[in-house]
Image (cartoon, helix red, strand yellow):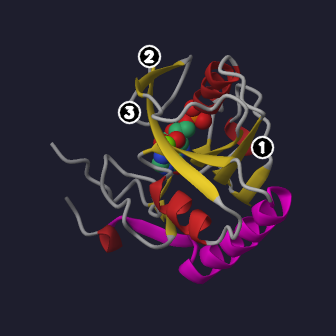
Amino acid sequence: MQNYKDVLAEILIDTETLQARIKELGAQISVDYPDGNLLLICILRGGVPFMVDLSRNITSPHMVDFMAVSSYGAGKRESSGSARVTLDLQTDIHDKNVILVEDIVDSGHTISSVLHMLETRQPKSLKVCTLLDKPERREAEVPIHYLGFSIPNKFVFGYGLDLDEYYRNLPFVGVVDLDKYKPPL
Ligand code: IMP
Ligand code: MG
């Protein structure tokens, strides 16, 4: 795999800007849910860095859990149709305040089908917190209650977002230079 520097067109959101916004989101969630009974659900794998930093910035008591979904009929960089749960929660969400934590809402299909599925378990409340939003790409309507950044329709990587499973560790969000990128065999 190439070094990230060879495929980076530009840094879209730098580390300082990311962390400052996540601090604000954590403060807002702490005010909105002062009394606990809060569960953050991280959608694997892209949501991990965001959820960890967000959780550290929430001062009210809360739990965390994880789920993984894969979308039907999806190409490698596309998502379409509904999502299938490949790893379910350990936590019973009945009567809990739930916040779904995602890296990015793109077409909206993933979050939309996860929301429908979780509604059937009757949480007390169900909200969406996403680091990034690409509104130009939306196909399924999704309510976003907490948003980090709205971004243009460009393929991005870093801070949880992958390029063929690499570069999730980078502490910033970068734009891919598709002319320079050579996918691994
Ligand atoms: P949606 O169902 O189209 O909203 O898909 C969302 C998922 O697609 C995200 O959770 C990401 O895993 C992936 N995705 C969408 N856009 C990007 C991107 O620009 N970079 C990396 N992954 C992306
Ligand atoms: Mg994801």
Q: Position of residue 90 (x, y in %)?
A: 45, 34
Q: Mark 3, residues whose alpha carbon is within 10 Å: few (<14), some, or many (≥20)?
A: few
* Residue 76 numbered mark, or none: 3
Q: Position of residue 101 (x, y in %)?
A: 60, 48
For the residues marked 1 and 3, what is the alpha-carbon distance in whole angstroms?
A: 24 Å
Q: Is residue 185 left or right of residue 72?
A: left
Which quadrant is the N terminus positioned in?
bottom left
Q: Earlier in the sequence, mark 2 or mark 1?
A: 2
Residue at horizontal 69%, vertical 74%? 23
For the residues marked 2 and 1, what is the alpha-carbon distance in whole angstroms?
A: 25 Å
SS label for mark 2:
loop
* Residue 144 numbered mark, or none: 1
Q: Position of residue 12 (x, y in %)?
A: 58, 69
Which quadrant is the C terminus positioned in?
top left
Q: Is residue 178 left or right of residue 82?
A: left
SS label for mark 1:
loop
CB-based contact (under 8 Å), mark 2 and mark 3? no
Vertical arrangement, residue 124 with respect to residue 17, above or below: above
Q: Nearer the viewer, residue 61 or 182?
A: 61
Span shown in magenta: 7-34
CB-based contact (under 8 Å), mark 2 and mark 1? no
SS label for mark 3:
loop
* Residue 73 numbered mark, or none: 2
| Amino acid type for the residue under numbered disc 2 | Gly
Majority secondary structure in the magenta region: helix
